[in-house]
Amino acid sequence: MSGVTCQDVRNLFDAHLNGELPPPLETELNAHRLKCPACRHELALLEVAGEVIAADDGAPALDDAFGTRLMACLAERNTSRQVRRRRLVRIGARALATAACLALAVIYFTRPVPRVAGERHEAARTNASRMQTDAVEQDTAMSQAAFRAQLEQALTDWREDASSLKKVYDFITPQTEEMRLEHSENVHDQPGPFELGRPGAPPESDVVSTPTIEDI
Amino acid sequence: MDSNGMQRAQEAELIGQAQRGDTRSMRDLIDAHQDRLHAFVWRMVRNHHDAEELCQDAFLKAFAALDSFNKRYRFSTWLFTIAYRLCLNQLRRKRSLTGEMDFSLVSTEEEDVSEHAAQSEEAARLKKVIWGAVDQLSVPQRASVLLFYRQEQGCAEIAQILQLPVSTVKSHLHRARARLKDILEPAVADNVMGFRILSDAAG
C-alpha cells in the first residue's frame, strides 16, 4: 500500500481504536505513524484519552448496604405481588361464581315455559272446533250431494215425462189437425166455440153462465 | 464476584434459578453487576444519590421482567439497556426543570481523586480535562464512550444497549473522539509524550 497519505491513515484511526483493523492495514498504519509526526501526535491524543477513561473514572463507591436494601425491596415486592395475586384469585373466583349464578338465573327465568292447562285446553278446543267444522262441512257436502242426486233424478224423470208427452203430442197433433179441418168443412157457418152471438157460436142455452151474486 | 469472570453458562444458571424465585441467585447477580452499573449510571447523571436510586430501579425492573429475558443476550447487556433508558428519562426531567445543564458545575460536584494511586499534578490535570470533555459530550456520545472504554463493550453490544444501529454507534464514537481531541489538543500540546508515560503509570 505505497503512497499512503495522512488522510488515508486518519481514516483508519477509528477502526484501529475499535480493534477492528485487519493486520495488513494495522501494519500500514504503524509504519506511517512512525515517520509522520502529525499523525503520530493525533493518534496519541486519541489513544491517551481512551486509556485515561478506561483506567479510572473516579466514581464514588456504592454503598455497602445497597445489595441488602435491594434484596429487601425485592422481597417486599414479591410478598405484595403474592398477596395481590391471592386477592385477585379470590375476587376472580367470587366474580366467576356470581356470574355463573346470574347466568343460570337468567336462563331459568327466561326459558320458554308453556302454560300447560290453558294451552292444552285451548288446543283441544281448537281441535274440537276444527273437527266440528269438518263434520259440518262433511254433512253439508253429503246433503248437497243427496239433494243433487234427487234433483238429477227428478230432472231425469221430467225429461222422460217430457219425452212421453212430446210423443203423445206428436201423435195426436196430426189427427187433431185432420179433425179440425174436417170439422171446419162441416160447420163452417156455426160460430166458434168461443164466439157467443156470432156465427158458429153455440146456442146460448148450451153455454153455462157463471153464477153471480145476484143469482145467489 | 465480577461479571467479567462470570461465564455465560454460570450466568444462565443463575438467571434460571432467579426466575424460579431463588433469592440467593438474585443476590449473586446483583453483586456481579452493581459496581459497574453504578459507575456507568453515575457518569451519565453525575449525581451520587440519583445514580444509586437509578441503579436500584434498574435492578428492580430487570428482575420484574426476568421471565421475559432473552437468554441469547448477556444479563449485563439487558441491565445496562434498562439503566440507560432510566438515565435518559432522568436527564430529560432535570433538563426540563433546570434548562441547559451546566457541565462545569456538574463536573466539579464530585472530585474524582483516586486515593490509591499516587498521581502527579499533571496526571490529575489530565484526568480532569479528559473527564470534563467527556461530560460535555452529548448523551449518546457519552454513553458510547463509557460503554466502550469503561465497560469494554464492543460496538455490537453498545448498539443493543443503546438500541441504535451499529453504524450510528460508530459515528458517535468517531465524533466523541474528535471532540476529545479538540479539547485535549490545546491543553497538552506541549507535553504529549509526558502524558503517555503518566497514563501508563496510572493504568
Image (spheres, grey):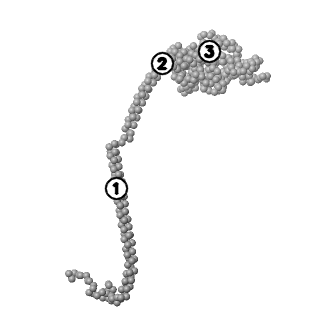
Residues at marks 2 and 3, CA–CA distance in whole angstroms? 34 Å
Q: Quadrant of residue A85?
A: top left
Residue A136's tag is: 1
Mark 2 and mark 3 lie on one chain; the one further toward the N terminus is 3
Q: Position of residue A84 (x, y in %)?
A: 44, 24
| Residue at the image point whose x is 38% and y is 37% from the top | A108
For label 1, count other residues whose C-alpha is less than 10 Å away and answer few (under 14), some (14-19) or many (20+).
few
> Looking at the image, do the residues carrying marks 1 and 3 touch, with CB atoms under 8 Å apart?
no
Task: Report the side of B152 relative to A181 (left or right).
Answer: right
Say what amino acid the circle numbered 2 marks: Ala
Q: CA distance from mark 1 to mark 3?
A: 119 Å
Q: Quadrant of the C terminus of chain B?
A: top right
Closest to the camera, between mark 1 and mark 2, is 1
In the rendered image, which residue does mark 3 sit on? A56
Q: Earlier along the polypeptide chain: callout 1 or callout 3?
A: 3
| Foreground residue among A18 and A80 | A80
